[in-house]
Image (tube, rainbow, N blue to C red):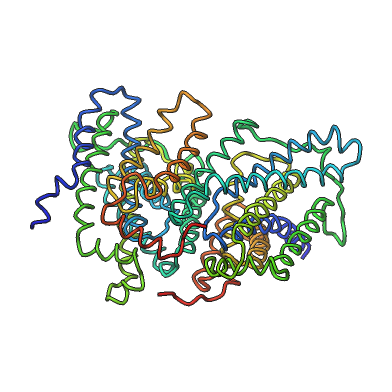
Amino acid sequence: MRIFLEQMLNGLTIGSFYALIALGYSMVYGVMKLINFAHGDLFTLGSYLGFTLLVWGNAYVTSHLGLAAGMIAAMLIAAIGIGTAGIIVERIAYRPIYPAGRLPAVVSALGVSIFLQNMIMVIWGPRYQAYSVNVVPTVHFEMGGIHFTLLQIIILILSFILLALLYYIIQKTTFGSAIRASALDRDTAALMGININTVIFFIFTLGPALGGIAGVMVGMYYRQISFTMGWNYGLKAFTATILGGIGNIPGAMVGGLLLGIFEMLGSAYVSTAYKDVFVFLVLILVLIFRPRGLLGEKVAEKV
Amino acid sequence: MKLNENIILKNWFIFVVMALLAVSPFMMNNYWIDVFFFFGIYALLGLSLNLVLGEVGLFDLGHMGFMAIGAYTTAILNTHFGIPIIFLMPVSALTAAGFAWLVCSPIIHLRGDYLCIVTIGMGEIIRLILINNPFGITGGPNGVFGIDFLSLGGPLIIDSSIESYFVIWIVVGLTIFALINLQRSRVGRAWNCIREDEIAAESTGIDVRYYKLLAFVLGAGLAGVAGNIYASKLMIVSPESFSFMESCMLFCIVLIGGMGSIPGVIIGSAAVSLFPEIFRAFAKYRMLIFGAAMVIMMIFRPGGIWPRKRGSLEFKSLLTKAGEDNV
């Protein structure tokens, strides 16, 4: 039972990373019908940006205002930076290709992904980089035999605030209904007076910004980052998106959290080496029996 | 019969390329011959993915998994039981094809991006299983090594760069010949029909499920052959060679060249395999340039370098119909 609860907590932590990254995939897919393969690498870029900021912030912000201020500053700046990078990628690499359809945009996205990955390698070097110990909180707790860290609590609270905020924006506000309308049918939404360009700007900044924050969190949680990790996290997050039902915002959140929990329970009770096999098997089984994902609605076949 | 008369004229590009490829190794050093060998491997894999993605329009981002099955079948059977490589070529093809039939049967009803993620998952599962060394037969992350060279009987052993170059390109040539015929057959027309409009295809009596599975099985079989040749050339197979990244590269080969276009696949595989070599002088910047080139390429020629002629007309109408207008 103790192991189960600890693994659930770890699973939720990892799941919240996946959920934050998955939102970027899901929003972009919902409106643009494009699998944004560059998203995983934007996440890595966020992680590296956070790394640089925290090392720099350690000397200035952290020493003057404390650990919390340094962390918040790093996440904020990473979010703004990656949000900007996201919209730049959209303007340069995707916008000119929209008229040509979906598949060329996928190749372009893969090109951006390779470009970003190698850009990170050129700037920060091909070796692993490590977040140093003195820029992240290292306090441990024990409650009823369950071990957890302060960092885990911070990550969980912060990501749940972000997820709740995004859920509120998408589901409750007027602008959110504009996004959902564009996801349903972009052309009709435009005819109804929705400014599609604002919607696109929003999804291509907010999605990567959340990914950037997740990048800093992953850096602080695992301490070690590499320039190729975007593929792995991107793949998992994309899996989470599909698991929940692609283009469905609550689905991406649920899918991400479930995937994290599956992964940790799989590694605890099945086998650590086969945990990713377990994750993909769950995905395939879900899709065989629910081809539109867990929360995806059944869409009638259009002729 | 009238159609058959202009087959040389219609496919002049392929004949020119094949003629150039037949003489070029005598003017290259071994390094470039090996580069061109991998060009051939990519071309064969590109052709095999083209059956699934180009002809039928099924998103398959786990295609390297099928090649891995073929390569490991060859490697394991050759190193453990000493079966000659030449006999293992059909065995690898059949194993990969059988595997494709087995795993694709339950998922073939999935559409578009859902199929895409399931094939990614399948490719990753294969790679992860190979890394984890089940029953101690796949050698874990190190892979299987000590695979024999291809022997054509007697003293004919394919052990030099130039010989393996000819082996791969002869196989590619035969495959192209078969595929040109397949494109114009009942099967090829049914595939294209499914690509353009699945519901219309189904309503005209095409067994969509059967033809989709057929594409996967044939594509996987060809990838298995590529795996066999690859294993006997390198004498080692290891899981990193079959990563998700490589599957993405295959996807790009088909789309850079032009969906369903055989000359396109040749050009696409040349781009993917030769580009990084030509830009080797730029060392660590070359993949940066490669990524940027992919983006620029798609901005200026979104339909691919050499789109299939008949296909390209249909492709355009498909796009405008899907409502992917300018935003």
Q: Position of residue A179 (x, y in %)?
A: 63, 65
Asked if residue B117 shows in the view, the reply is yes
Q: Position of residue A76 (x, y in %)?
A: 77, 47
Classify residue B201 as left or right of residue A279: left
Asked if residue B95 shows in the view, the reply is no
Number of numbered discs: 0
Q: Position of residue A257 (x, y in %)?
A: 68, 62
| Viewer-closest of A269 and B111 | B111
Q: Position of residue B57 (x, y in %)?
A: 37, 60
| Viewer-closest of A227 and A284 | A227
Q: Measured along the vertical axis of the image, is residue A216 above or below residue A156?
A: above
Q: Measured along the vertical axis of the image, is residue A263 above or below residue A301?
A: above
Classify residue A18 as left or right of residue B270: right
Q: Which residue appears at 78% of the width and 57% of the height?
A: A156
Q: The N terminus of chain A lies in which quarter of the figure?
A: bottom right
Picture quarter containing residue B214? bottom left
Q: Which residue appears at 63% of the width and 61% of the height?
A: A259
Q: Which residue appears at 56% of the width and 36% of the height?
A: A118
Classify residue A201 as left or right of residue B141: right
Q: The C terminus of chain A lies in which quarter of the figure?
A: bottom left
Q: Which residue appears at 57% of the width and 68% of the height?
A: A189
Classify residue B122 as left or right of residue B175: right
| Viewer-closest of B185 and A228 | B185
